[in-house]
Amino acid sequence: PRVSIYQLLFPVVYLLTLVMFCWLGKRIPRLNRVITNQIDPVVLSRQSPIDGLRGILATSVFAYHFYITYGFANTGKWISPTIPLLNNMGAVPVSLFFMITGYLFFNKLKQAQTDWIKLYSGRAKRIYPLYLSLAILCAVIFIGQNGVAIDWAGLLLWLGKWLGFNVPPLPHFYAKPLIAGAVWTLIYEWAFYSILPLVAFLWHRQPKLTVKYSLFVLATTAVAIYLFMHSIPQLHLLFILAMIPAYFAPRFKALQQRFTPLMHGLVPLLALGIMIYTKPYSLTQMLCITLLFSVIASGYDFFNALQNKVLIFLGEISYSIYLMHGLVIYLALLVVPSFNFAWPMGVYYVYLPLVFLLTVILSIVTHNYIEKPFYQSKNKRQNHLQSPQKSV
């Protein structure tokens, strides 16, 4: 398809916004204190490029939906861009979020014993509080827009369907722009969590099974199959491919240490090639992303960029950014009359830094007052696995 100058300009505007925020985050004392206090000391001490990577992924998804909103406001259709580079600003982060989840949990399954109650309880506490808060906010906005003429039974049924990550449309209320279409990825997350007991059983080849554990494995596998049938099958491959960096991490690290100059030349080119030339969620893209993530998971940080404290901070609040950015874009641009969508797209881009900042502010609030109370105790900060969607 033909590419306009505005389309080519948008990724540049996003990158400049991110770079400027990182620069200001280091040089404004008050903002620097907020950022420093927000980061878990354990996260800083482990110096993993994955933490900074999350910050880029979540903000890229935000930018992707910011771009789509302009088209939605003018056409009434929530559709993906036709340009691969713009489309991949959403698809590649989602793919990498899936791969991060698979990588972390495959590493966790290396342990001979897994406390499944603790694992599932931790996942529910990590994902549901903020997710259900978003559902309630959507309902409040729906009520505010429709007054008292509401089918309350239908509204409660709609809210109930959120529990299964199924968000159908409501009459006279198109919620997709409000949630930025981001919650669909949680189905894939839970399908992966559900298949883990079977994976652990096959991995460790347990010779003796109790009846209780056998029933547990069968039940969780049945849930995984159900979710698999209600999703796009090939996307689950991203979790499976995450076994490659989880299993071969030492070898990738050795290669990186041996050929560091070559890595500095090839890895950025690989990342750029994925964004520009690969089709979203294609097998080619998945394999290229697997190679890219394998290198990052083994310690490659793009000339130390992924060790940037501001990116790590954005990674720390990435789940809030991922879920709440649609709400901010919706309220700031579609509800409050702050922008005339008859204006050129180039003028629209000027609003990106402001909406980005509002999203970060709201995400700090929701991270501290909705997420943290559920996954951290009052007096002790614990190391924890984070989900992106842990989203798209």
Image (tube, rainbow, N blue to C red):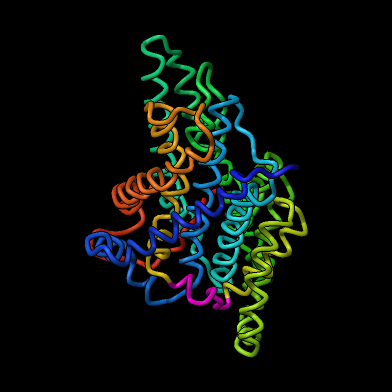
| Magenta region, residue range | 298-307
- In the figure, 131 relative to 315: above or below? above
Picture quadrant of residue 33: bottom left
Say whether residue 42 is magenta. no
Magenta portion: prevailing SS class:
loop
For the residue pair 62 and 98, the one nearer the viewer reads as 62
Which residue is depicted at the point 50% across and 57% down? 15
Which residue is depicted at the point 45% across and 13% down? 151
- In the figure, 287 relative to 60: above or below? below
Which residue is depicted at the point 37% across and 26% down? 140
User: Which quarter shows the N terminus?
Assistant: top right
Image location (x, y in percent) of residue 167: 55, 31
Count the labels in the image: 0
The answer to whether residue 215 shows anywhere in this view is no
Image location (x, y in percent) of residue 276: 69, 56
Q: In screen coordinates, is 346 left or right of 138? A: right
The answer to whether residue 318 shows anywhere in this view is yes
Q: Residue furthest bottom?
A: 258
Image location (x, y in percent) of residue 356: 41, 47
Image location (x, y in percent) of residue 91: 63, 50
For the residue pair 157 and 307, the one nearer the viewer reads as 307
